[in-house]
Image (cartoon, helix red, strand yellow):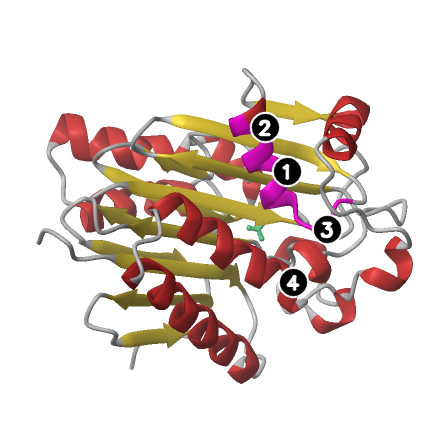
């Protein structure tokens, strides 16, 4: 296995039967450049950061440029990142006017002793770091390209990435505009380490779906705990956690990857934009169930 690498992405779990050809094509393009990065020796941390930036900027998913407004017409974004090798993590919640929330989360991890920044302090930190800002949110964001027109409870499109690099290190990242039409100040699972994002030396997880259910299930960490303490396979642990979320009334999906390169891409809803590339260069990208 040594030297093998893997990148897996999700562009959100959804409940709809729209034509998602552009979404899968976009995932394929991002996987190709992710493969190049990892083949050139990029760290898992850099690979997930780059992939999430590309999905944020595509305007197709409910994250970054594609985010939808909250009930007051404002754009409040959440993101988190975790480096499995060092177990360092960073996150931002309900931030406004930053072009790349995942870069802001990474800056929290790398430039502060904290894990999660929110509110006006987070906004000031983002400015201090010199991260690119959005001057005119109303013209920058493109929610009409995403699923923001569908009812709130069916409206998902978070993006996420997990990677294993040539050195066997893992990382995970998640970024979202949250539920479109959400109450101002609402923070979902995406910036919560252990709910939507987890990475350590054994596995990396990113989730999407109805965030409140993923927070209450401590979903990402529970997958890790089931593997570590019950000895379940990654696939079985992921399925159990998603089944629990579904029976509680929620829905969504997970991408998970372990140090052996095993992957679980699973969801409890009509589909999830998802894709994988491995060192052999073969690309898999789909939105609906495998035939
Ligand atoms: N999990 C996100 C949230 O609840 C939404 C999503 O995944 O689409 O904010």
Q: Are marks 1 and 2 in contact (CB under 8 Å)?
A: yes
Q: CA distance from mark 4 to mark 1?
A: 14 Å
Q: Label 4: which residue?
A: 57
Q: Report whether residue 247 is seen.
A: no
Q: Report whether residue 53 is seen.
A: yes
Q: Secondary structure at mark 3?
A: loop
Q: Label 3: which residue?
A: 99
Q: Is residue 35 left or right of residue 50?
A: left
Q: CA distance from mark 1 to mark 2?
A: 6 Å
Q: Are marks 4 and 1 in contact (CB under 8 Å)?
A: no
In the image, residue 102 lies in the stretch drawn in magenta: yes
Q: CA distance from mark 3 to mark 4?
A: 8 Å
Rendering coords of residue 205 (x, y %)? 36, 43
For mark 4, does the 10 Å Cα neighbourhood hold few (<14), some (14 to 19), or many (20 or more) residues? some
Please give the name of the residue rendered at 24% of the width and 65% of the height, measured from the top-left corner.
278
Q: CA distance from mark 3 to mark 1?
A: 9 Å
Q: Label 2: which residue?
A: 108
Lower position in the chain sequence, tag 3 or tag 1: 3
> Is residue 192 depicted above or below 161 in this figure?
above
For mark 3, does the 10 Å Cα neighbourhood hold few (<14), some (14 to 19), or many (20 or more) residues? many
Q: Secondary structure at mark 4?
A: helix
Q: CA distance from mark 3 to mark 2?
A: 15 Å
Rendering coords of residue 37 (x, y %)? 37, 61
Q: Which mark is residue 104?
A: 1
Rendering coords of residue 153 (x, y %)? 65, 53
Q: Are marks 3 and 4 in contact (CB under 8 Å)?
A: yes
> The C terminus appears in which quarter of the rendering?
bottom left
Please give the name of the residue rendered at 66% of the width and 49% of the height, measured from the top-left corner.
100
């Amino acid at each position: 296995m040594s030297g093998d690498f893997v990148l897996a992405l999700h562009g959100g779990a959804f409940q709809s039967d729209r034509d998602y050809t552009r979404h899968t094509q976009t995932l394929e393009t991002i996987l190709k450049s992710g493969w190049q990065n990892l083949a050139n020796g990029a760290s898992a941390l850099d690979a997930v950061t780059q992939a999430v930036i590309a999905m944020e900027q595509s305007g197709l998913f409910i994250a970054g440029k594609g985010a939808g407004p909250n009930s007051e017409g404002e754009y409040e974004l959440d993101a988190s990142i975790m480096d499995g090798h060092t177990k360092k993590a960073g996150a931002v919640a309900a931030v406004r006017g930053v072009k790349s929330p995942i870069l802001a989360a990474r800056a929290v991890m790398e430039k502060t002793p904290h894990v999660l920044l929110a509110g006006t302090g987070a906004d000031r930190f983002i400015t201090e770091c010199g991260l690119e800002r959005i001057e005119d949110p109303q013209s920058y964001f493109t929610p009409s390209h995403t699923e923001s027109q569908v009812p709130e409870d069916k409206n998902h499109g978070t993006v996420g990435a997990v990677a294993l690099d040539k050195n066997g290190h893992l990382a995970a990242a998640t970024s979202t505009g949250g539920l479109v039409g959400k109450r101002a100040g609402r923070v979902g699972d995406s910036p919560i380490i252990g709910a939507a994002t987890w990475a350590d030396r054994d596995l990396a997880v990113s989730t999407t779906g109805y965030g409140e259910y993923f927070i209450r299930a401590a979903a990402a960490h529970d997958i890790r705990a089931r593997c570590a303490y019950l000895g379940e396979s990654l696939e079985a642990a992921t399925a159990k956690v998603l089944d629990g979320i579904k029976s509680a009334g929620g829905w969504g999906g997970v991408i998970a990857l372990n140090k052996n390169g095993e992957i679980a891409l699973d969801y409890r809803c009509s589909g999830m934009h998802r894709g994988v590339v491995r060192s052999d260069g073969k690309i898999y990208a789909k939105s609906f169930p495998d035939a």
